Image: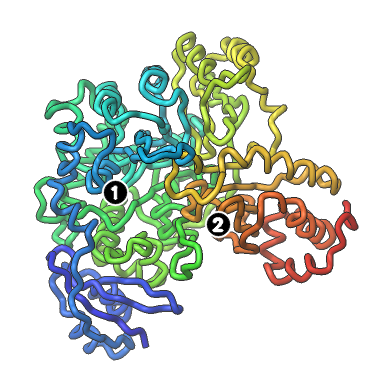
Amino acid sequence: AIVLYVSPLERPSHRYPHLLRQNQRKMKLSSAAALALVVAASPAAAFAPHSPVDVRTAAAGSSSSQLSMVLEKPKKLSKLEILKTTSDHLEVPLKEQLYTEEINVSKDAMQILKYHGSYMQTNREIRGKNKDYQFMLRLKQPAGELPADLYRLLDDLSANMGQGDLRATTRQCFQMHGIRKGNLKTVISSIMNIGSSTVGACGDVSRNVMTTPAPFVTPEYKYAREWSKVFAQLFRPMTPAFDNIWLDGEKPANEVKWSKDIEGYHVDEAMTLDTGRGIILPDSVEPLYGDRYLPRKFKIGVTVPGDNSLDIYTNDIGVVVICNAAGELEGFNVMVGGGMGRTHNKENTFARAADHLGYVPKEDMMELMKSILASQRDHGNRDVRANARMKYLVHTLGIDNFRTLVESYFGKKVQPWRDMKEWKYMDWMGWWDQGDGKLFYGLHVDNGRVKDEGDFRLKTALRVIVDKYNIDMILSPTQSIIFRDVDPKDKDGIDAIFREHGIKPLEEVDPLARLAMACPALPLCGLAQTEAERKMPEYIGRMRSLLDKMNIGDEEILMRMTGCPNGCARPYMAELAFVGDGPKSYQIWLGGSSVLEGRTAFPYMAKMKWDDLESTMEPILAMFIQQKQEFETFGDFCHRVGADAITRYAETYAPGSVKA
């Protein structure tokens, strides 16, 4: 029997949350989630309109559900949940804090500021009583699209009001670091007025919607780009706080550019459509989010069959475009419950790859997306933020019962998942034929850092190209940059600009570097336990030397590094990952899929010191040489043999004894 602790909340839109223990992991759910277990035994109940149901009565009436309920005293709202409800839809106390003489904002204002796209940071390498407060600003760029005029603006703003560089994130948007509090309003208002946004780049809302970055003109790629913008608009926060704070209550000079690309989809009408099933809240400002928004951040990715360039299984919702043989859109395969964040030494937090929910016809897609969001909004864990992501709700209910919960909002059955071609991982670097007579070029950027440093002048090169050719760009899920719609006659000129600015041609980039990612970590991230971005180039070089020494230099191993366990660089999907677990040390994770499909890696070792990379990895690579199957990748090998076998092999390995 599953024991459910029922604890009604004060707010009517979030009735009956409770604690469910399953697989020895403690995670909280609502009574409607428990009711999903009940209606699994009686599916017709899923299609009745939502109403305040006493889950104890419902469970008692279902002999097959095997649910037992234990009452618990009502819990108070957490401080953060109270802050959201008293913020006047994300305006208070941030607005007044921006005009104080201090160079920082209060803790409460800092939490609200995240919804506006910014984190307050300090340089942790500067010692002293007075902290050097500054702000990181993250843009919202659905599908990773970066128009030429927006890059010019960001280039100027980062030079004049930031720390002089830009950083491409793993979710296809730019971050700008080093902004002072007094400049925040100028920077954000400039971005808003040019037709871009920072709204919802952070906070407990839908984040930047990712898609495959390849700008092919085939129907399925076109639909992937369009629908990523549809979902971005569908789940955008509607509060006027953004205009009130950054534009003094005025509207931006230009509406966000991506909204014009999807005018025919009638997204606003779909957003507010009320089917009477509990999706739409009685909140005139935020009909989908209400005044408490979501329990935690919410991530969406969109791609086409076979193209897993964006780590589709790491998202709360992963969407795959399904077209017929004529290239006409029929619907979407949908997966749910992915997420990377975890906490060291807390087994009730874990990385998770998404499950396949099923297939939905195109005409029902926006309503299904609303139904999934409402399921998490109403039944995600608002008491323990470490367990607040939707992956814990999906994990605890199981995919079948979660599907039933979603269907109770949706009012229809989700159809079975449709078969697709096998996944492949592509980074889309180098020159490609776009399919319409134009070219696109993928430029590898080490760890996403766009900067000028000595003879390496990437930031200047991008500005020269944008000014000369007026080319739009796309940020890739691997922190790199794609130039789209390039006239073939301009190809040689663009290559020349890169050479003149000290940028290596693709054939000179180590494949290990192309596959690698790292988060920023120190010195600005407050969560970092050790280095990542600044350490990864050294580790790539050392791994290259080790592979060459063992005569397996042709092996391409997908490596990722983070300074803490929160997983911003998606380390738990990699074949080999280094996850910071203390000063100058990493956890080692092994066994992710080389095509990033459907599984996470496993922890192999904790507290590996920086200097122990070679002695740690050599036995693993030796075992790989001796025991791998034909065409087996490093990640698949580690997954097949497992941590125990690798540990036993390493214990008896003689250094230098194995080479290919």
Badge 1 amino acid = Val
State left or right for residue 541 relative to residue 238: right
Residue where numbered disc 2 is placed: 581
Q: Which residue is at a point 56% across and 36% down the rendered structure image?
A: 447
Q: Is residue 326 visible?
A: no
State left or right for residue 491 relative to residue 148: right
C-beta proximity under 8 Å, tags 2 and 1 = no
Q: What's the mark number on residue 14?
A: none
Residue 402 place in picture, x, y as percent:
35, 68
Q: Residue furthest front?
A: 129
Residue 456 place in picture, x, y as percent:
61, 20
Colour convention of the picture: rainbow
Q: What's the mark number on residue 205?
A: 1
Residue 440 place in picture, x, y as percent:
54, 24
Residue 283 versus residue 503 in the image, above or below: below
Badge 2 amino acid = Asp
Q: Which residue is at a point 15% across and 63% down the rendered structure image?
A: 13
